[in-house]
Each structure stands twice: as structure tokens, then as C-alpha cells.
Image (spheres, rainbow, N blue to C red):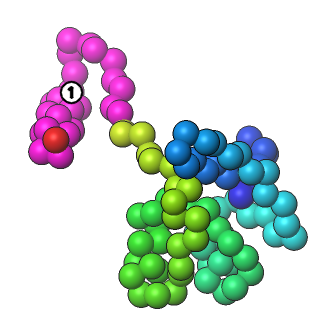
Amino acid sequence: MRLPNGSLFRWEFRKRGQTALIDVTGPLTLDEASLSRIAVLEGVGLGFFMEPDVRGDFEAGRLVRVLEDWTPELARLCLYYPGRRNSSAAHTAFVALAHEVAAARK
């Protein structure tokens, strides 16, 4: 996978405190996750994806997860915003909703 800055995405795996960063090489380099998914579905090779992007493929049996015990846990999402006093109503509502969703997940 080629990143927008031109560099190649390094695959990162973690297991029991060990981290492995893999520089992937091969005959095909793409710059769009959806194209990578199609290539993997067509049997071109392995892919490294965000689970929500391929969950339906797992459930339908189109893809098989490998190295599951090396899959790193994802950090929780964070919302950063300027602490201005004069926020728009939409901004204030979005931040309140984000707080509600986060509280519901605890």
C-alpha cells in the first residue's frame, strides 16, 4: 500500500510484548484500500486491512484471517477540537454526542 506521501505502508504486528514491523515487497503496489481488497479477493496475495472494511468478507467466507494472534489492539479514537467559547450549535451537538457514545461504551 502506497501512502499519500509516497512511502510504503509498513505492516505492524504485536504479540506478547513483541512488535514486528514488516516492509512488504511484491509485484503490486496500490494506493487505495478498496483496490487492495479487490486484489486480495481475486487471489493476488495477502492484505492488511482495518477490520470494519472487510468484516462482511470474513462473515461471507470470502476472506480468511491469518496471524490473528499477532493482530495489534487499536488505540481508542480521540476527538480533538479547539476549546473556543463560541462554538457552532452543530459543533456543540457533535461533541455532546461523542461524549454520550463514549460513555455508553464504558
Quarter of the image that includes the N terminus: bottom right
Q: Which residue is nearer to you in this view: 53 or 83?
A: 53
Please say whether residue 27 is one of the residues in the magenta stretch: no
Residue named by callout 1: 88
Left or right of 14, for residue 26: right
Name the chief secondary structure element in magenta.
helix
Compared to residue 89, the image places residue 57 above or below, namely below
Q: Specify whether residue 52 is in view.
A: yes
Q: Residues within 10 Å of mark 1 (few under 14, many from 20)?
A: few
Q: Quadrant of residue 101?
A: top left
Residue positioned 35% across, 33% down in the render? 78
Compared to residue 58, the image places residue 61 above or below, namely below
In what element is the residue under mark 1?
A: loop
Left or right of 57, for residue 30: right
Residue positioned 36% across, 39% down in the render? 77
Residue 30 place in picture, x, y as percent: 74, 64
Residue 47 place in picture, x, y as percent: 64, 68
Magenta-highlighted residues: 78-105
Q: Quadrant of residue 103?
A: top left
Q: Which residue is nearer to you in this view: 102 or 106?
A: 106
Please say whether residue 90 is one of the residues in the magenta stretch: yes
Q: Label 1 sits on what residue type? A: Ser
Compared to residue 2, the image places residue 41 above or below, namely below
Residue positioned 17% across, 34% down in the render? 99
Q: Quadrant of residue 98?
A: top left
Left or right of 89, for residue 55: right
